[in-house]
Image: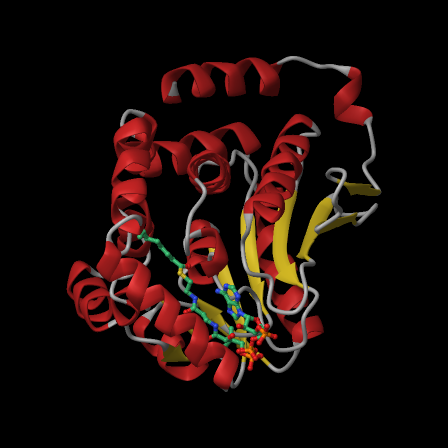
């Protein structure tokens, strides 16, 4: 599959079609409109905004919209993508806990499959990606950010993979993308403790690349990073990125069903349900 996608990418990049001349401006990815896309006419860079108030928790519909958006960016040969959020304080609260609490079998399957799709498309995207992290970014929110190649975080928020604090283990593709950013030592420490880093701590450890004063500044900084690729062949860039990430991508691509079954098994454990129930209550009591 990865090899196929590299072959496909070659064909797409070397063929000259009308699509190359097409200018994207603004598109919405699907019926539910949980993701907004704005493309800068001059640079061709798309700002993709998660828009599921209040906290952009990733439910089936948001993941499906995001997945469709990533498809559209790829087929429109995007020059680059900046992922951000419409909230003033939350980038994404991670997976919607209600998708995992008292799960309905068919929906749970569709939910996890959509998350796998988003991860494969975002982590393996041929176009360059950056995250303008304009708010808290726990768990699945952090996952989206670490799939991107560059992260700029607004001051005074938190980011991390805190799954162990919820009594669950981060799935293997969460771990592989975390290790792509942090050293194995730092990743192990943070994952086992479920550390949520402040913006400054995240910068120090290398989880984010720059700090910004506000959302506009974070988008600006992401844009500057993406514009550096104007000097580089897009095909060479994409091959290099996908070669570096190939093992991680293949690990999920070749084990999707097993990964799904592991998720279904985990969320159906009474102890996990009890923990998630208590966590939902604690969020509501805040
Ligand atoms: C078993 C296999 C492995 C599965 C892997 C899972 C990975 C995950 O992503 S699990 C999700 C982990 N997420 C979190 O731990 C974040 C929890 N949320 C927060 O810490 C805070 O909400 C926040 C820091 C993101 C934002 O704080 P803020 O004060 O602005 O908002 P709140 O008042 O806390 O929340 C508003 C509203 O939203 C509900 N909510 C928050 N997070 C989630 C969520 N992840 N899923 C569903 N719903 C969430 C919260 O309960 C509030 O709801 P009400 O308005 O109804 O009270």
Vertical placement of residue 116 versus 152, above or below: above
Vertical placement of residue 247 versus 13, above or below: below
Name the residue nearer the viewer: 103 or 249. 103
Q: Residue at x 25, y 42 (%)?
A: 265
In the rendered image, residue 145, in percent from the top left (x then y), is placed at 48, 58
Q: Can residue 161 be seen in this view?
A: no
In the rendered image, residue 153, in percent from the top left (x then y), is placed at 52, 72
In the rendered image, residue 82, in percent from the top left (x then y), is placed at 63, 54
Residue 68, by quadrant, is top right
In the rendered image, residue 240, in percent from the top left (x then y), is placed at 40, 34
Residue 27, by quadrant, is top right
Can you say which quadrant of the picture contains the N terminus? top left
Q: Which residue is drawn at 66% across and 39% down?
A: 69
Q: Which residue is drawn at 59% across and 20% down?
A: 13
Q: Can residue 49 be seen in this view?
A: yes
Tell me if 2 is positioned left or right of 129 in this view.
left
Tell me if 275 is positioned left or right of 72 in this view.
left
The total number of labels drawn is: 0
Name the residue nearer the viewer: 202 or 31. 31
């Amino acid at each position: 599959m990865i090899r196929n996608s590299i072959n496909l990418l070659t064909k797409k990049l070397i063929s000259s079609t009308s699509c190359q001349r097409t200018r994207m401006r603004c598109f919405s990815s699907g019926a539910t409109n949980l993701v907004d896309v704005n493309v800068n006419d001059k640079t061709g860079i798309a700002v993709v905004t998660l828009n599921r108030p209040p906290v952009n928790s990733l439910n089936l519909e948001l993941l499906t919209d995001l997945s469709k958006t990533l498809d559209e960016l790829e087929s429109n040969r995007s020059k680059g993508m900046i992922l951000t959020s419409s909230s003033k304080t939350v980038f994404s609260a991670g997976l919607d806990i209600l998708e995992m609490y008292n799960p309905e079998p068919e929906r749970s399957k569709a939910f996890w499959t959509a998350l796998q799709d988003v991860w494969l498309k975002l982590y393996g995207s041929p176009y360059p990606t950056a995250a303008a992290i304009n708010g808290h970014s726990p768990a699945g929110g952090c996952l989206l950010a670490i799939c991107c190649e560059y992260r700029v975080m607004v001051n005074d928020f938190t980011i991390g993979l805190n799954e162990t604090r919820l009594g669950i283990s981060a799935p293997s593709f969460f771990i592989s993308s975390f290790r792509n950013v942090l050293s194995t030592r730092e990743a192990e420490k943070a994952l086992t403790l479920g550390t949520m880093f402040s913006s400054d701590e995240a910068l120090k450890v290398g989880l984010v690349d720059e700090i910004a004063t506000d959302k506009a500044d974070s988008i600006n900084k992401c844009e500057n990073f993406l514009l550096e690729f104007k000097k580089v062949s897009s095909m060479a860039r994409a091959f290099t990125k996908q070669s570096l990430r190939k093992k991680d991508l293949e690990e999920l691509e070749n084990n999707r069903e097993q990964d799904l079954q592991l998720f279904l098994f985990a969320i159906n454990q009474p102890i996990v349900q009890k923990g998630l129930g208590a966590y939902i209550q604690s969020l509501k009591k805040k």
